[in-house]
Amino acid sequence: MSASKCMYCSSTSIGRGCPYGPKNVHVHPMNAGKCIYCGSMSIGRGCTINPNGDIHVHGVDYNNMIKEALHNGIAVGLLMRKLSLPFIEWPAYKTGIINENGIQLKKPITVKEKASYTGNDAYIAKLKRMLTESQIELINNTVYLSNKKQDNMDASVFTEMYKQEIDTKQQIDNLINQLVQLIADSYVKGLNATDIEKMIIEAINSR
């Protein structure tokens, strides 16, 4: 595991000596299980470095933070994509489970029908009916702009990030294609959509 770095100067040093940190103290927010100021595993009072007092402040678990951010990002992305998609383009419409207004016409019976209309789909359909198209567009734009905001970024950095985004997107596309094929095969073998959703979430959370 790589050493934790100060959020202000990127140094691996602990304690005083940071030219930019509060009262020249290095701050390690990703130092999981240890005080972000002195590196101690102690809890409570006793930190001699904390610039705001004497309490040990423990860092976050970086892996758990990434998993939570990934889970939330995927959830928001899938939700907004579904909300923005007209009901006539939903798989549930094409299988005859819902009409053009998102109203459920019948209960899913076959494997294909159950896969096209899960509990999450029913919830999103209800939410979509409550919102106007302009409200959905506003929410979508707000989320997009918030995620894409970059402060003080010059052209060279932006270009490099764009290249990395393209490469990462291609790798993600390949993985998603494999996941979709695996899900399709699982449906054929008799697994239901709810169980598969739980497996995916559990797999993400176990990393």
Image (cartoon, grey):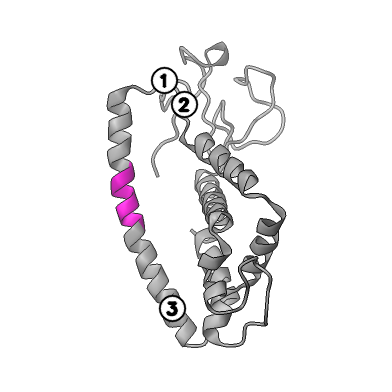
Main secondary structure of the magenta stretch: helix
Q: Which of marks 3 and 1 is nearer the N terminus?
A: 1
Q: Is residue 161 left or right of residue 14?
A: left
Residue type (three-letter) at the residue carrying disc 1: Asn
Q: How many marks?
A: 3
Query: For residue 115: magenta?
Result: no
**Callout 3 secondary element:** helix
Q: Earlier in the sequence, mark 2 or mark 3?
A: 2
Residue 26 rendering spot, x and y as whole percentages: 50, 21
Q: In this view, does 108 lie above or below 134?
A: below
Residue 154 rendering spot, x and y as whole percentages: 33, 22
Q: Is residue 195 left or right of residue 7?
A: right
Task: For marks 2 and 3, give the CA distance.
Answer: 46 Å
Q: Residue at x 50, y 48 (%)?
A: 63
Q: In this view, does 11 lie to the left or right of 34?
A: left
Farthest residue, direction front: 100
Towards the viewer: 49 or 143: 143
Residue 62 visible in rendering: yes
Q: Nearer the viewer, mark 2 or mark 1?
A: 1
Q: Is residue 51 above or below residue 89?
A: above
* Residue on which the image places disc 3: 184
Q: Nearer the viewer, mark 2 or mark 3?
A: 3
Q: Which residue is drawn at 64% across and 36% down?
A: 42
* Residue on which the image places disc 1: 152
Q: Which of marks 2 and 1 is nearer the N terminus?
A: 2
* Residue on which the image places disc 2: 6
Span highlighted in magenta in the image: 165-172
Assess whether mark 1 and mark 2 are in contact (beta carbons under 8 angstroms): no
Task: For marks 2 and 1, give the CA distance.
Answer: 21 Å
Towards the viewer: 150 or 133: 133
